[in-house]
């Protein structure tokens, strides 16, 4: 008589073999780029989205990214292949090239600690554009924020604030990351000034710039000096009673940091009608990566009870003059603007 343990081991081996077969077929189908074939296999065989080739370690997402198929990537994400998506994007950074992801970059351009220890340069370039620059190593600078972003900020504030139920009373606003102060200036210039305007900023040079510009003296403005992670679960934020509008535009952070911020958004928003957005710039030198990061953000926000509406904003062309010698951190023709709101209970 076969023992129950042996039977269980046999059943488990059969199950593992079936998963391996289905997973291998999925990888092979994805490699061909045939979206219809991939859909058919997923529908009929229900292959495990987490399956990885035992030799290469690649999953279906790896393969889809390597052939640069945004359609397959979106489909696989929809089917649940989300768990290691950012790891895969980072691993494929060198494969795609163009500096999409700086996986080994320890300069101020990619390391928060290095950034906060760096010196910033505020200036106006030869075209009259305000810029804030930081040394990115190797004699290269990168813009922390640049004047060409103004149309993005204009439309963001318009969509975040227009028609808000409490706009006539003055909104309660939280902004993470001051930069050049573009979006905060727009918030202050609303038809009715915010009744509360909280700004979280960690960089000492930016804080000094804010003092010079009089931000510490503006009515209703509260400046919290430090990283958002220092305040996100503290009484410093919860004591304000929630926000109508939240915006975040940090520097040298990765998607994992943004996702961590997203997790706290439902507790920070006042409720229905409140809105959140962020500078959607991750992967913005490669259309494939940009699409995937945007899709990932929408899916994760949905898990946290928020729906996302998108609109496109034209970005200035590749004219070198707008970059003032900065490393180009956005090279796509369209910026995808996200506006997120809490779903009805």
Image: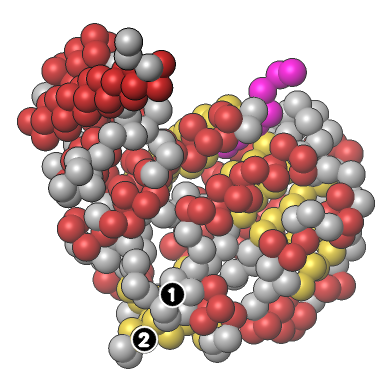
- Element carrying mark 1: loop
Q: Is residue 185 above or below residue 6?
A: below
Q: Looking at the image, do the residues carrying marks 2 and 1 touch, with CB atoms under 8 Å apart?
A: yes
Which of the pair 40/175 is nearer the observer? Answer: 40
Q: Quadrant of the C terminus?
A: top right
> Label 1 neighbourhood size at 10 Å, few (<14), some (14-19), many (20+)?
many
What mark, if any, has residue 109 been given in the picture? 1
Q: Pick whichever, 237 or 170, lies toward us.
A: 237
Q: Quadrant of the N terminus?
A: top left
Q: Would you place residue 304 above or below residue 285 in this image?
A: above
Residue found at x 59% / y 70% = 180
Q: Nearer the viewer, residue 139 or 259?
A: 259
Marked residue nearer the N-terminal end (2 or 1): 1
Q: Is residue 96 magenta?
A: no
Residue placed under numbered mark 2 in the picture: 137
Where is residue 52, by image quadrant? top left
């Amino acid at each position: 008589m076969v023992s129950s343990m042996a039977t269980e081991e046999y059943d488990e081996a059969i199950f593992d073999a079936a998963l391996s077969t289905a997973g291998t077929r999925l990888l092979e189908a994805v490699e061909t780029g045939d979206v219809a074939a991939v859909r058919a296999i997923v529908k009929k065989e229900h292959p495990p989205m987490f399956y990885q080739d035992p030799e290469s370690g690649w999953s279906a997402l790896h393969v889809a990214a390597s052939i640069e198929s945004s359609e397959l990537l979106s489909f696989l994400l929809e089917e649940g292949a989300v768990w290691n998506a950012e790891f895969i994007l980072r691993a494929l950074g060198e494969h795609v090239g163009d500096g999409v992801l700086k996986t080994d970059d320890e300069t101020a351009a990619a390391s928060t600690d290095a950034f906060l220890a760096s010196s910033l340069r505020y200036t106006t370039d030869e075209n009259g554009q305000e810029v804030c620059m930081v040394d990115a190593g190797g004699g290269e600078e990168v813009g922390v924020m640049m004047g060409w972003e103004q149309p993005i900020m204009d439309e963001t504030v318009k969509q975040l604030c227009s028609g808000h139920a409490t706009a006539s009373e003055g909104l309660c606003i939280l902004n993470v990351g001051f930069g050049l102060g573009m979006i905060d200036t727009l918030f202050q210039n609303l038809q009715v000034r915010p009744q509360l305007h909280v700004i979280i900023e960690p960089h000492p040079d930016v804080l000094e710039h804010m003092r010079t510009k009089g931000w510490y003296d503006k009515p209703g403005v509260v400046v919290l000096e430090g990283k958002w992670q220092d305040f996100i679960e503290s009484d410093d934020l919860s004591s304000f009673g929630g926000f109508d509008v939240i915006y975040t535009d940090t520097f040298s952070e990765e998607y994992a940091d943004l996702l961590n911020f997203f997790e706290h958004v439902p507790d920070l928003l006042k409720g229905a009608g409140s809105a959140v957005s962020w500078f959607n710039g991750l992967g913005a030198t490669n259309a494939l990566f940009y699409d995937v990061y945007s899709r990932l953000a929408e899916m994760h926000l949905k898990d946290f009870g928020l729906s996302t509406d998108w609109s496109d904003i034209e970005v200035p062309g590749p004219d070198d003059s707008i970059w003032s010698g900065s490393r180009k951190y956005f090279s796509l023709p369209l910026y995808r603007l996200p506006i997120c709101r809490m779903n009805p209970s």
